[in-house]
Image (cartoon, rainbow, N blue to C red):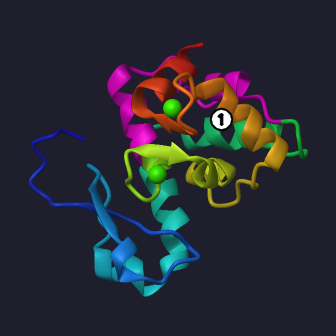
Amino acid sequence: MTQGSSSVVCCLSVRCRSRSSADLNLQLYPGLQLTPQRAFTNHCQTYKVLEMAMNSILNPDDIKKALGAFKAADSFDHKKFFEMVGLKAMSADGVKKAFHVLDADNSGFIEEEELKFVLKGFATDGRDLTDKETKAFLQAADKDGDGKIGAEEFAALVRE
Ligand SMILES: [Ca+2]
Ligand SMILES: [Ca+2]
């Protein structure tokens, strides 16, 4: 997992519902070996790719435990979740990497729509957040009030 890794590795970020190739954004992730073509063969495997990327940052067992703790609708608590998955104690670099995984369309922000599916960025079987949870999560993170979560807002939130 060094920056100087010789293998060029790509993470394909494309929303499941969109088939437009214009939505394709390539992101570099150390440690992932999927080619864009292979990932795009089944664009609904996107979350699988995100999961793999997240597993290279966090401990999969911790992710599993954290997802299990918030299985019930409207039970999501971002503070406890970030602590359980190990993000709270993670280096700034690791938090940044996690942010880029969760920014599925690579726009530089986690928008409300991405936030709703944010648990799928940790594991493909992660549930969707309810509208109430999504709004509360966004409100907690969105300090500048632009309706989306930037990298710095995300970093601040996981440290809370
Ligand atoms: Ca985004
Ligand atoms: Ca914001």
Q: Which range is magenta?
A: 76-100
| Picture residue at 15% right of the left edge, 40% below the top | 3
Q: Is residue 158 visible?
A: yes
Placement of 140 over or under 105, stated as above or below: above
Placement of 82 over or under 4, stated as above or below: above
| Picture residue at 50% right of the left edge, 29% below the top | 154
Q: How many marks?
A: 1
Q: Is residue 118 left or right of residue 105?
A: right
Which quadrant: the N terminus?
top left
**Which element carries disc 1, helix, strand or loop?**
helix
Give coordinates of residue 7: x percent, y percent.
Answer: 14, 59
Magenta span contains residue 2: no
Residue to which mark 1 is pinned = 138
Which quadrant: the C terminus?
top right
| Picture residue at 32% right of the left edge, 58% below the top | 32
Q: Is residue 56 left or right of residue 33?
A: right
Give coordinates of residue 59: x percent, y percent.
Answer: 53, 37
Q: Quadrant of residue 76?
A: top right
Magenta span contains residue 89: yes
Give coordinates of residue 21: x percent, y percent.
Answer: 36, 81
Placement of 141 over or under 5, stated as above or below: above
Main SS of the magenta part reads helix
Give coordinates of residue 123: x percent, y percent.
Answer: 61, 53
Which residue reaches farthest top?
Answer: 160
Placement of 38 over or under 2, stated as above or below: below
Q: Is mark 1 within 8 Å of ligand 2?
A: no
Q: Is residue 56 visible?
A: no
Q: Amino acid at mark 1?
A: Leu
